[in-house]
Image: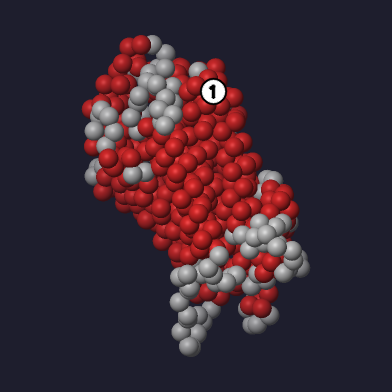
Amino acid sequence: MSTLAGTGTLLRFALRRDRVTTPVWIAVNALMVLSMPNTLKSLYGTAAERTDLVRQLQTNASYRALIGPLHDTSLGGLTAWRVGVYAGLLAAVTSLLVVVRHTRDEEEAGRAELVASGAVGRRASLTAALLAAAVANAVLALLITAGLAGQGTAGALSFGLGLGATGMVFATTAAIVAQLTESARLARGLTSAVLGAAFVLRAAGDSATSEGSSPWTWLSPLGWLENLRPFAAERWWVLLLFAAAVLVQAAAAYALAGRRDLGMSFFPARPGPAAGRLGSAAALAWRLQRGGVLGWSLGFFLAGVVYGGLTEGAADLVGDNANAREIFERMGGQSGLTDAFLASMVGMLGLVAALYVVASVLRLNGEETSGRAEPLLAGPVSRLRWAAGHLTIAFAGAALIMLLAGAGFAVGYGRQVGPILGACLVQLPAVWVIGGLTLLLYGVTPRLAPAAWGVAVAVLLIGWVGPALNAPQLVLDLSPFGHLPKLPGGGMEWGPVVTLTGLAVVLAGVGLVGLRRRDLTG
């Protein structure tokens, strides 16, 4: 039997399972990119504004590290500069999630063994996972190419291909890591660490020089995406670097897959202690989620340090650009530009914290659907005690990561420590509302629990893209974050904070009642 037998069937099954989540990730990425031209046209509509932007980037290493160098001042070039790195990051995250889900996740849950008992080749599952990632990246590339074709066909094609190729590089990276580790969570975490290292290398290279490319940039696939130079005399040969990386990593993944037993890994998990140390459901929840909490905490602290370091140059970068100033003030409130920048950055971290709380609450759903919750609840553990452990980590963990973000701002900026910490904590009621809604969906209608990701992504888009697109206030008010006071710089308003906190409590309470009354799904 061929080692690829059954690949087509497994691919169709993978695409069917991902028919909601993957299109959402692709749509978010495409919308982020395609919304930029009109926004940038209003921001940098004149030659003088674009010349001033180039001058500011040449002298501001921090912003080159954050966004990247500007190779061309056309509207397409500005779009590739402004969102290229982050669109590449999002494509990479989508790809690694798809590959790990259809490889290591399936083995960990025991479904891969059942599938392998049929007429399925040894490498069919891995091939189907990589093909599913390839389909997602191809759709993204087509959307970007078609959407930006009006800015220049060659530039749009190179940008679309670059984003798709970036996604495939990290898809094959995830395929290798999935062979090395025994845990799907660890596979996602290690691949994300590789992605983070790629971002750091690119940032270090871009900040080191204002002209040309640093050797550090060429060590990162995200740096290759920049050096492809869409809309700026495209370097088509850079695509060969992507192709070589994908082929080499895919070959390594296939070689590793053929040398291990199903369900095993080259770096197996360490055995636990002979005598158990977990004395409560809360301790078990912390054991299961501590890696995620530590990862998010480190990420938020570093993000605070980076954004804090950029604060001093915010006013210089915006300069006299009234439209850019208006966007910052719309995101951060009517205050001084520095305070508006701080408020907008803190608000963005609050939006990202909503993703953390959704992931943490949905861990309950993962434990239930995998069958691990049922034997635990068969003992002297009530459902509410079991859920309370995970919910404490979700809601208290959100407070922890926002506090660490504030500490990062204190390190990077060194001023207004108290007001910035307060601004970070003010984001929590909105974060908790998203967590409460997630618990409501899980507790009452567990089949709809994954829809919480759609809610979080919608809130993220409203908060991120809405002000740039000059969305009506009615649309901005759909997000709980739109009702929070804009701190620092604005006045403290306790009414919305108390109301949102109460709403979060009600949503969580209804969700717990639903969980207590319904049957478990296993």
The one of 338 and 42 positioned closer to us in this rendering: 42
Quarter of the image for residue 2 reads bottom right
The residue nearer to you, when weighing 402 against 304, is: 304
Question: Visible in this render: residue 91?
Answer: yes
Residue 368: x, y in percent?
A: 66, 67
Residue holding disc 1:
148
Local packing at callout 1 (Cα closer than 10 Å; few below 14, some 14-19, many 20+) is many
**Hey, which residue is sitting farthest front in the picture?**
1
Residue 418, can we see it? Answer: no
Q: Look at the picture and state if 109 lies above or below 487.
A: below
Residue 221 picture location, percent across and down: 40, 42
Quadrant for the N terminus in the image: bottom right
Q: Is residue 190 above or below residue 18?
A: below
Q: Residue at x 49, y 48 (%)?
A: 247
Say which element carries label 1.
helix
Quarter of the figure that contains the C terminus = bottom right
Amino acid of disc 1: Leu
Residue drawn at point x = 52 percent, y = 49 percent: 171
Residue at the farthest bottom position: 275
Q: Quadrant of residue 328?
A: top left
Q: Is residue 175 left or right of residue 307?
A: right
**Left or right: where does residue 453 sit relative to residue 320?**
right
- What residue appears at the point 36 percent right and 11 percent down from the top-left corner? 47
Q: Residue at x 27, y 37 (%)?
A: 214
Rendering colour mode: secondary structure
Q: Check the image and report above or below for 206 versus 261.
A: above
Percent from the top left, x then y, of residue 40? 45, 21
**Which of 512 and 94 lies nearest the eye of the viewer?**
94
Left or right of residue 82: residue 429: right
Query: How many numbered marks does the figure carry?
Result: 1
| Up-down relation of residue 449 to residue 33 (above or below) | below
The x, y position of residue 59, in whole percent, is: 23, 27
